[in-house]
Image (spheres, rainbow, N blue to C red):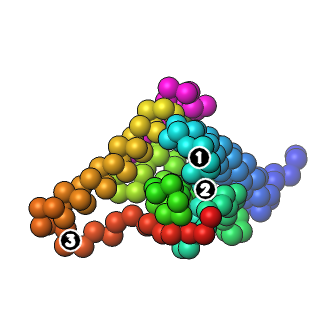
Amino acid sequence: MPKSPSRLTQVSAAAKIYGERSFDNYAQIRSVAEQIRNGLCEWLDSDKQCVFLVPPQGPFTSQNYRSGAFSVTGKGFLPLEPISFGLAINISGEGDFMRLVLTCRKEGDKMYIHVDEGREADLSLPPTEENLTKFYESIYEHLMNWFEGRVDQYDNGSYGNNDIGFDIMRVDT
């Protein structure tokens, strides 16, 4: 009678499958993040790099942080969970950047992307050009609503609330 695998062998096999899925999750989210970064900059009609992948929290400069832009950076065993990253957008044409925090989760053949305190969008996997363009439009609308809303609040005497707001920072370019 063959000996059944030890419990440790069974846990190791389950951990290996988990590791494969967590890497697949990270790789797909990173690929979508890079497509968003590149496509959004082009869609905004900028002649220079105007969108960067940055960490979702803490200080940043106008550069792409590669794997350092993702919330799972520095964790030993890559967790299988939604992943956040920062999208720094040049809002002035100079050194002023607004960081949007995007949190992505993959479900089947879709990527669900939650933008800051805003709404959630979904992209098919792999993303189509049409799907990405709709997403860029929603980011543009999100930014415009934020700025125009704050100006309207100021103009009408109602801007003293306790919103956390966006992370706007002047960085050396």
Q: Residue at x 81, y 54 (%)?
A: 5
Determine the residue positioned at 24% across, 55% down: 149
What residue type is disc 1 on?
Answer: Arg
Vertical placement of residue 3 versus 61, above or below:
above
Mark 2: amino acid: Leu
Closer to the camera in the image, 130 or 108 = 130
Q: Residue at x 54, y 73 (%)?
A: 58
Q: In this view, does 138 lie to the left or right of 55?
A: left
Relative to the observer, which residue lies in front, 106 or 59? 59
What number is the disc on residue 37?
1
Read off the residue under disc 3.
161
Location of residue 95 in the rendering, given as x and y in whole percent from the top left corner: 53, 64
Q: Vertical placement of 45 versus 50: above or below? A: above
Using the image as rendered, state which of residue 94 and residue 117 is in the foreground: 94
Furthest toward the right, the residue is 2
Residue 22: x and y in percent read 66, 52
Determine the residue located farthest toward the left in the rendered image. 156
Residue numbers of the magenta segment: 120-131
- In reply to whether residue 153 is colored magenta, the answer given is no
Secondary structure of the residue carrying numbered label 1: helix
The location of residue 127, given as percent across then percent down, is 57, 31
Viewer can see residue 111: no
Please give the residue where the numbered disc 2 appears in the rendered image.
53
* In this picture, residue 146 sits left or right of residue 35: left
Disc 3 element: loop
Amino acid found under the numbered disc labelled 3: Asn
Q: Name which residue lies at 57% across and 51% down.
A: 50
